[in-house]
Amino acid sequence: MPTEPPPSRWSFPVPLDAEPEGPVAIGGDLEPGTLLEAYRHGLFPMPLGRRDRLGWFSPDPRAILPLDGLRVSRSLRRSVARMDVTVDECFVEVMTACADPSRPHGWITGDFVDAYARLHRMGWAHSVETWLDGELVGGLYGVAIGAFFAGESMFHSATDASKVALVHLVERLRPRPAALLDVQWSTPHLERLGAVEIPRSEYLGRLAEAVAQPPLPLG
């Protein structure tokens, strides 16, 4: 069972009527209690400006990946068959690869890696790793609360490796009633995999139901 941290010393505004794209709140910290409070209320953090401030976002519409809507091509099925997948074997390595500063639009700072590594040690943040011939070639990480999984980032160094990790994650989530896979903002890449956008109000309702469920067994 995950370890519940001390509560946050910050409180977040209700995001229901917030601006669709901009931050709902600015400031705060990346303490475990703050992060969990944010995710439970439909918010996630990203650095602002010169990365010395935190922004807390709740997009409207919100992108999710329906668990019965993942599109698995024939070539991806072949990749699934030839790659090995593990869970929580090397969380920091996966997140560090996602934070590679050479990636376009990179935003994951060292402070974020440290903060989510703490959540991982407490049982709230998880990684899914993809291996080829014994080498780590892809993966994803995110935060799990009840039957809710907030997908944060993915990486790959071999074709389809991050998608293979996503297939594994969806297979683990699919049997759970009320499970919700959040992917935050829609992108063409995620849309090709089956991601859709839903109104923030609908997302918040589904989130409340998902976080009330027992913890996810991801392994």
Image: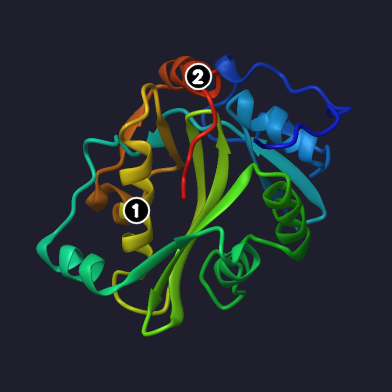
Whether residue 96 is situated above or below residue 22 in the rendered picture:
below
Q: Would you say 49 lies left or right of 8 here?
A: left
Whether residue 157 is situated above or below residue 187 in the rendered picture:
below
User: Which residue is under mark 1?
Assistant: 168
**How far apart, in angstroms, are the residues tagged by discs 1 and 2?**
25 Å
Question: Relative to the observer, which residue lies in front, 216 or 9?
Answer: 216
Q: Would you say 97 lies left or right of 197 here?
A: right
Q: From this viewpoint, is residue 167 visible?
A: yes
Q: Amino acid at mark 1?
A: His
Rendered image quadrant of residue 13: top right
Q: Amino acid at mark 2?
A: Leu
Please state which of the two labelled residues, at mark 1 or mark 2, is closer to the viewer. Answer: 1
Residue 205 image point, x, y percent: 47, 14
Mark 1 vs 2, N-terminal side: 1
- Report the residue at 10% width, 63% height from top: 74
Q: From this viewpoint, is residue 155 visible?
A: no
Residue 61 image point, x, y percent: 42, 29
Residue 42 image point, x, y percent: 58, 27
- Report the residue at 31% width, 32% height from top: 175
- Report the residue at 71% width, 41% height from top: 55
Decide: few, some or many residues near mark 1? Use Cα within 10 Å; few <14, some 14-19, many ≥20.
Answer: some
User: Which residue is under mark 2?
Assistant: 204
Specify the label residue 97 is tagged with: none
Report the colour scheme.
Answer: rainbow
Rendered image quadrant of residue 56: top right
Q: Would you say 59 lies left or right of 1 here?
A: left
Whether residue 128 is situated above or below residue 57 in the rendered picture:
below
Rendered image quadrant of residue 16: top right
Helix, strand or loop at label 1? It is helix
Helix, strand or loop at label 2? It is helix
Q: Is the N terminus in the top left, top right, bottom left or bottom right quadrant?
A: top right
